[in-house]
Structure formats: structure tokens, C-alpha cells
Image: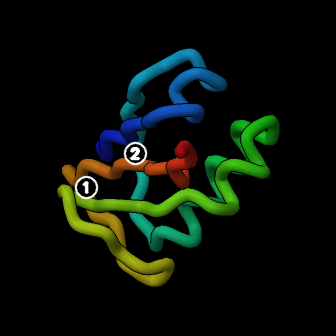
């Protein structure tokens, strides 16, 4: 199982803070899976940064069983 944590606008749009499911693959593959599961967040998901076990990772990083994945949208403000 991997734990997916949603922050900021993603949390608001999806109505949940986190979820867990079976997944092993790259960050890129996870992004595609989430897009198919939640097409309404496509614009946000395209600019989200992924952190695995509290460290930012790139698209080809391999996610493994037991990992905690945070989806962090860009922050705006003034």
C-alpha cells in the first residue's frame, strides 16, 4: 500500500486529505493513474510536485510499497 496525501487546492477539490491503495511504479505512472481516476483535477495535476517520504522526486522515481507520497500544488499569493 502507498499513502497518497493531498494538499491545498487538491484537498479541497477531492474532498479528502489522503487515501491508500496498492501501487508500484514511477511518479509519472502515478500521475497518469490519478488523472484517469480524477479527471476534474487535470489542470492542477499537471503542475503538482511530488514528494516521496518527505523528499521531492522527479517523474522517473520508482514508488514502492509502504511509501508516503505527497502531492503539492504550486503556491500562489502575495
Circle 1 crowding by C-alpha within 10 Å: few under 14, some 14–19, many from 20: few
Q: Which residue extends farthest bottom? A: 60
Relative horizontal placement of residue 58, taking residue 9 as reference (left or right): left
Residue 22's mark?
Answer: 2
Q: Is residue 47 above or below residue 77?
A: below
Quarter of the image with the N terminus is top left
Q: Which residue extends farthest top? A: 15
Its colouring scheme is rainbow
Q: For the residues labelled 1 and 2, say whether their Cβ atoms are less than 8 Å apart.
A: yes
Residue 48's mark?
Answer: none
Q: Residue at x 57, y 16 (%)?
A: 15
**Residue 42 point in image, percent of width and height:** 77, 49
Relative horizontal placement of residue 5, taking residue 14 as reference (left or right): left
Q: Secondary structure under badge 1?
A: loop
Q: For the image shown, how many numbered marks are present on the structure?
A: 2
Relative horizontal placement of residue 76, taking residue 7 as reference (left or right): right
Q: Residue at x 37, y 33 (%)?
A: 20
Q: Which residue extends farthest front? A: 78
Q: Residue at x 56, y 71 (%)?
A: 28
The answer to which image quadrant residue 40 occupies is: top right
Q: Secondary structure under badge 2?
A: loop
Q: In front: 49, or 65?
A: 49
The answer to which image quadrant residue 41 occupies is: top right
Q: Label 1 belongs to which residue?
A: 65
Circle 2 crowding by C-alpha within 10 Å: few under 14, some 14–19, many from 20: few
Q: Residue at x 44, y 36 (%)?
A: 7
Distance of label 1 from label 2 (alpha carbons): 7 Å
Label whose residue precedes the other's in the sequence (1 or 2)? 2
Amino acid at each position: 500500500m502507498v499513502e497518497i496525501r493531498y494538499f491545498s487546492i487538491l484537498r479541497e477539490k477531492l474532498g479528502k486529505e489522503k487515501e491508500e491503495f496498492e501501487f508500484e511504479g514511477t511518479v509519472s505512472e502515478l500521475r497518469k493513474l490519478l488523472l484517469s481516476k480524477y479527471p476534474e483535477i487535470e489542470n492542477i495535476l499537471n503542475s503538482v510536485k511530488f514528494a516521496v517520504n518527505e523528499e521531492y522526486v522527479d517523474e522517473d522515481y520508482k514508488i514502492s510499497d509502504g511509501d508516503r507520497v505527497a502531492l503539492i500544488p504550486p503556491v500562489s499569493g502575495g
